Image (spheres, rainbow, N blue to C red):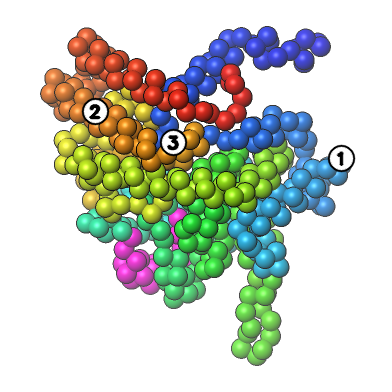
Amino acid sequence: MAELLQQNIWESDPELFELMKKEKKRQQCGLEMIASENFTSLSVLQCLSSCLHNKYSEGLPGARYYGGNEFIDQIEWLAQKRALAAYNLDPEIWGCNVQPYSGSPANFAVYTGLIEPHGRIMGLDLPDGGHLTHGFFTQTKKISATSIFFESMPYKVNPTTGLIDYDKLAEQAKLFKPKVIIAGVSCYSRCLDYKRFRQIADENNAYLFSDMAHISGLVAAGIIPSPFEYSDVVATTTHKTLRGPRAGVIFFRKGLKCIGKNGEKIMWDIESRINQAVFPGLQGGPHNHAIAAIATAMKQAKAPEFVTYQKQVVANAQKLCKSLQDRGYKISTDGTDVHLILVDLRNTGITGAKAERILEDISIACNKNTVPGDKSALNPSGIRLGTPALTTRGVKEIHIDDIAQFIHRGLELSKEVTAKSGPKLVDFKNILETDVEIQKKVATLRDEVEKYSQQFTLPGLDEY
Ligand SMILES: *Cc1c(COP(=O)(O)O)cnc(C)c1O
């Protein structure tokens, strides 16, 4: 029994541990350019593997369904206090819930709290850079539960400029009459016009819900506009640019809402609705190890180094944009204000899927993505590239040109593969897996990328 309980993972389960070590090695050897990823700190990892994991604490601090929550309460209060402080929010007018298991459950809890079943929501369409949980559905299927249990209508970007078409949103919102308008993106390289979103929400008597999941680190650092001034509710993940644990946080307005016609005070009433949507509505016991990790990540977000880091993230994304443009690549919206760029590959003859695959083969991780005006969502024409994870490893502008060159060489190589395979993705993959000459070229490039990556440090534990 003692053995079962006290052995190290490398003793108790070498089979699993081997895989964990391999994953660590992969993270070390590759260039991680998936825009939603990051490498969290040792302190966050220590929270995640602590005793806090063991405790059940359904309810909110001070009002739990279980005993023994003296310290868990203090930890959750600390996380709440620091989350508000990270965004310079006055606790008299903003509250927060740090229990959501991740971004998607947080968003579902927001809708559940704010509106009735089948209430109407409008979010940026997924192929235009929005998120699944903003109500995504297709012609044939309601994909996200947010489109099954709520009625959603997407708004779009202008297919030529790639910028959100606020005028059309305003026009269509008048017809659809949404109860929630969502300002939030997963693949959009420009700052959002929250003031305009607020106007449109007001015209329709709708809530403005800002989902800052991707950009919450940049917002905390104060280097891009904050959604809080104009929003009623703000949600975020804590594991993307914010660099904390895999979790979610919801911020909501509280206190005085406005003065009514007869001079009476009208108060916000969404705090308890959102809290109850999280628990008992959608979740059970909070993940206290994650909540502790949120607390320490929010503390880190107040450090001067964090601001320096976020500035470097954006500088690196802008440099990457320029380096690729110099090599003839088209970047959606012709630039970036944030941590990512969307490369439009339509002028190269390479599809997003092929680009993603060849880059993966040379140890550069990114994802295929639709670009504005794409004909098919199933066969996207772009790739999304982000700099948060690279920047955590110490990548600076001087390295970005080398990295752009690796990407360029990978994409050029994919043209060679296509010349042999023809247009079909299966044939493309088949050539990659069987053609000896191509495999040699891929291996050479991969070795170069892997050697290059290893000069950069990774936070966390040494081996796993
Ligand atoms: C990543 C993301 C989410 C969902 O987060 P998960 O933790 O993956 O569930 C929600 N909204 C936006 C805008 C995101 O980018």
* Mark 2 element type: helix
Sequence-earlier tag: 2 or 1: 1
As measured in the structure, the alpha-carbon distance from the residue carrying label 2 to the one carrying label 1 is 58 Å
Residue toward you, 207 or 188: 188
Separation of residues labelled 3 and 2 (CA atoms): 20 Å
**Which quadrant is the C terminus positioned in?**
top right
Q: Dot 3: what SS?
A: loop
* 183 falls in the magenta region: yes
- Amino acid tagged 1: Gly
Instruction: Indicate whether residue 241 is drawn in magenta.
Output: no
Of badges 1 and 3, nearer the viewer stands 3
- 93 above or below 35? below
Tell me, for residue 68, which label it has, or none.
Answer: 1
Residue under pointer 3: 395
Q: Which residues are magenta?
A: 164-184
Q: Residue at x 66, y 48 (%)?
A: 299
Q: Picture coordinates of residue 68 (x, y %)?
A: 87, 40
- Pinpoint residue 142: horizontal percent, then vertical percent: 40, 46
Of the numbered discs 3 and 2, the one sitting upstream in the chain is 3
What distance separates the C-alpha of mark 1 from that of mark 3?
45 Å
| Ligand 1 contact, mark 3 (Cβ < 8 Å) | no
What residue is shown with label 2? Answer: 409
